Image: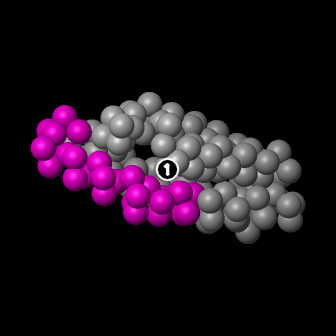
Amino acid sequence: MSVLIDQLIKEHSEIFADLTEANNLGIITEEGQNKLFSAKADLLVHLKNEDEHLYPILRKEAENNKHLEGILNSFSNEMKDISKSVMKFIDKYSDGVLDSKYVESFESIFATLSARMKKEESVLFAEYEKINQ
């Protein structure tokens, strides 16, 4: 496995660990708040790494590969919505005020991110590895 893919998978794990720990500590605690901010920072670093190192190589390959082009378009459109939802969640709950929808919102965000990252690892990262053999 390439160094880049190893790093991106590690970043996935760190994001999940931060979100899980923030939830376990309680968003209303200072420690929970710190973990939520850490998750946001980790996510932003991860997205930047993908944008700078993963996607340019995949886009270049997609110039001659319509199947990959379709995959990238689908992932790109999906990620815009996911990013907005996650950032909205983090911004909403980063001040420590909970509402009746917190648990439902957290579970939804966690499930959405989990599914997306598994899909990235099984589809996008696999495509990258094929290109860089």
Q: Is 50 positioned to the left or the right of 102 in the image?
A: left
Q: In which quarter of the image is the C terminus?
A: top left
Q: Is 119 positioned to the left or the right of 56 in the image?
A: right
Range of residues picked out in magenta: 43-68
| Residue 106 vertical placement versus 36 (above, below) | above
Residue drawn at (64%, 50%) of the image: 15
Is residue 83 in view from this perspective?
yes
Quadrant hosting residue 107: top right
Q: Nearer the viewer, residue 63 or 108?
A: 63
For badge 1, the amino acid type reads: Leu
Q: Is 80 positioned to the left or the right of 37 in the image?
A: left
Residue ID for mark 1 = 4
Q: Does the magenta stretch include residue 58?
A: yes
| Residue 24 vertical placement versus 80 (above, below) | above
Residue drawn at (19%, 35%) of the image: 67
Residue 125: x and y, percent?
42, 39
Q: Please, which residue is most extreme toward the front here?
A: 133
SS category of the residue bearing label 1: helix
Q: Please, which residue is most extreme toward the bottom here?
A: 95
Is residue 87 in view from this perspective?
no
Residue drawn at (50%, 37%) of the image: 1
